[in-house]
Image (cartoon, rainbow, N blue to C red):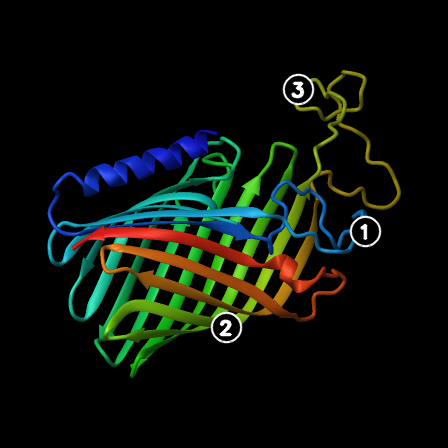
Amino acid sequence: MKLKKLTIICLIFGLYLGSGGLLGAFELEITGGVDLLTFNPSMETAHSDAAAESLEFKPFPFILGNIKFKNDISNNLAYIINFNRDNIIRNNLEFKLAAKTDYFNFEFGPFAGMPDALEIPSVGITGGLEFMFPGVVFIGVNASSTIGSQLDSLSNNTRETAEAKAGFWLPFMIATFSASTQNFTHHSDSGLTTRDNLIKYQASFDFYSKKNPSTFRLDAGYKTLNRFYTYSASSSGDPDDGNGNGNGDGNGDGDPDPVPPGPDIPDSNVRANTTDTLNALYAGFELRIQTRGNVKFIIGAELPVFFIDSDPITFPLFFNMTRAFIGIGIGRK
């Protein structure tokens, strides 16, 4: 409920800034949808685990959402407020300053994120850099990372993303080739640590017309979706040795435990790891219809078309794992 309130506040704030007569043009985009190719966020046993009830992957209807507001401060400088809800990085709110020239674009700023449960948010830095020769070629990188992601005491959830892309212009089409990764790690109070990881290699082809502002994009690629389960067993403790540290022979005289003969005793903090992995070829599209005014409509979908080497996990029919979204955008030039 509090996350929904945060989304509404971001939307109202964006509309207020856009209508407040600030310098330059503004753009506001709102999209929403569902992604069925998602591991259940509350699942604590891997599909491939021997204790699992079934080896069949069960699609989880994860609700997607994105609210992006961009306002131009000048011809070359703008700020961006973006709230994103994704099946990998969960809920993420970022604020970035963006600079652009004829030959490069640059974005940089802080972000805060959390899972659906109300927890201490993770705070980090996000940024991107793109170089281009307009009408010829472009290359870019962007990344984000939680600050102090190795320090569990700061937050129970951390996230990291990275992407590299390159492309070129053709008559009525822009071809883009990219490689990206997303990671989200969550530490629960029970000792279970889960890490969701998505790796994508994608080719995109944007079709456009000089006479029509609407665009159509085709996507195709290969993705690997991983879910890592790591469980840290709680220490059982030893009788008191008189020093308050739980080590002793149990008679309270302060003497250390005698070492029993026999095989080595396993450490009570040994971590057991299990991983679910899905590898798939996929295809998708996105259509942006621009009206004569400053309103545009957005619709898109993505569908796995072939799974590769995902044993022992089995799958339902492929159309049960669709990613689909719709949206609307408004702006002022």
The image quarter containing residue 266 is: top right
Taking the image as shown, residue 271 lies to the left or right of residue 104, namely right
- Looking at the rendered structure, the kind of residue marked 2 is Ala
Q: Quadrant of the C terminus?
A: bottom left
Q: Is 2 drawn above or below residue 40 in the view shown?
A: above
Residue 17 percent across, percent down from the top left? 20, 39
Where in the figure is residue 160, as x and y percent of width and height?
45, 52
> For residue 178, which quarter of the picture?
bottom left
Q: Tag 1: Cα neighbours inside 10 Å, few (<14), some, or many (≥20)?
A: few
Say whether residue 295 is visible: yes
- Does 63 sit above or below residue 77? above
**Picture coordinates of residue 61, whole percent (x, y):** 59, 48
Q: CA distance from mark 2 to mark 1?
A: 34 Å
Q: Give the foreground label among 3 and 2.
A: 2
**Distance Cα–Cα, label 3 vs label 2:** 63 Å
Mark 2, secondary structure of its residue: strand
In this rendered view, identify the residue nearer to me: 148 or 97. Answer: 97
Is label 1 in a helix, a strand or a loop? loop
Q: Is 215 in front, or is 60?
A: 215
* Residue placed under numbered mark 2 in the picture: 220
Q: Which mark is residue 50?
A: 1
- How far, Cα to Cα, is label 3 from label 1? 41 Å
Residue in the picture at 62% in, 58% down: 321
